[in-house]
Image (cartoon, rainbow, N blue to C red):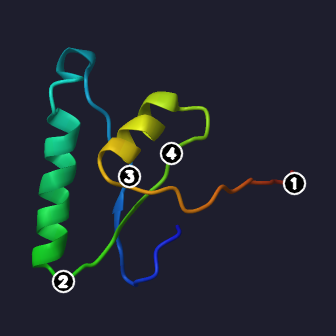
């Protein structure tokens, strides 16, 4: 997940309703998660976003996340 520390807090599936977007709700949630993580001894928060989810990618950058890597998933049906 691009983080150096273990264990790491992982932000999974954040979603903000349309009526609350562009009002700082996402930033508030991430700030609270960051504060909780810091108080509890964590030094990083990991997260992932699908490459084509432009809104979430932009939001993560605004919230202070940095892109660490891109991954391609493969599968083989058997």
Ranked by sequence position, the earlier of labels 1 and 4 is 4
In x, y percent, where is residue 19? 19, 15
Q: Residue at x 15, y 25 (%)?
A: 23
Q: Is residue 37 left or right of residue 4?
A: left
Mark closer to the observer (2, 1): 2
Residue highlighted by disc 2: 41
Residue highlighted by disc 3: 12
Residue highlighted by disc 4: 49
Q: Determine crowd level at label 1: few under 14, some 14-19, many 20+ residues with C-alpha closer than 10 A.
A: few
Estimate the spatial distance between the alpha carbons at disc 3 and disc 2, rounded to whole Å.
19 Å
Estimate the spatial distance between the alpha carbons at disc 2 and disc 4, rounded to whole Å.
25 Å
Mark closer to the observer (1, 4): 4
Q: Is residue 8 visible?
A: yes
Q: Is residue 13 visible?
A: no
Q: Nearer the viewer, residue 78 or 6?
A: 6
Give SS at disc 4: loop
| Res. 16 image quadrant | top left
Q: Residue at x 40, y 83 (%)?
A: 5
Estimate the spatial distance between the alpha carbons at disc 1 and disc 4, rounded to whole Å.
23 Å
Estimate the spatial distance between the alpha carbons at disc 2 and disc 1, rounded to whole Å.
40 Å
Residue highlighted by disc 1: 76
Is the residue 14 above or below the residue 33 in the image? Answer: above
Q: Residue at x 22, y 38 (%)?
A: 26
| Res. 25 image quadrant | top left
Ranked by sequence position, the earlier of labels 3 and 4 is 3
Estimate the spatial distance between the alpha carbons at disc 1 and disc 3, rounded to whole Å.
26 Å
Give SS at disc 2: loop
Ranked by sequence position, the earlier of labels 2 and 1 is 2
């Amino acid at each position: 997940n691009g983080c150096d520390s273990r264990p790491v807090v992982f932000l999974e599936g954040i979603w903000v309703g349309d009526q609350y977007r562009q009002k700082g709700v996402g930033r508030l949630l991430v700030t609270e998660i960051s504060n909780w993580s810091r108080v509890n001894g964590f030094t990083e928060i990991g997260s992932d976003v699908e490459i084509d989810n432009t809104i979430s990618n932009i939001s993560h950058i605004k919230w202070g996340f940095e892109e660490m890597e891109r991954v391609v998933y493969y599968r083989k049906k058997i």
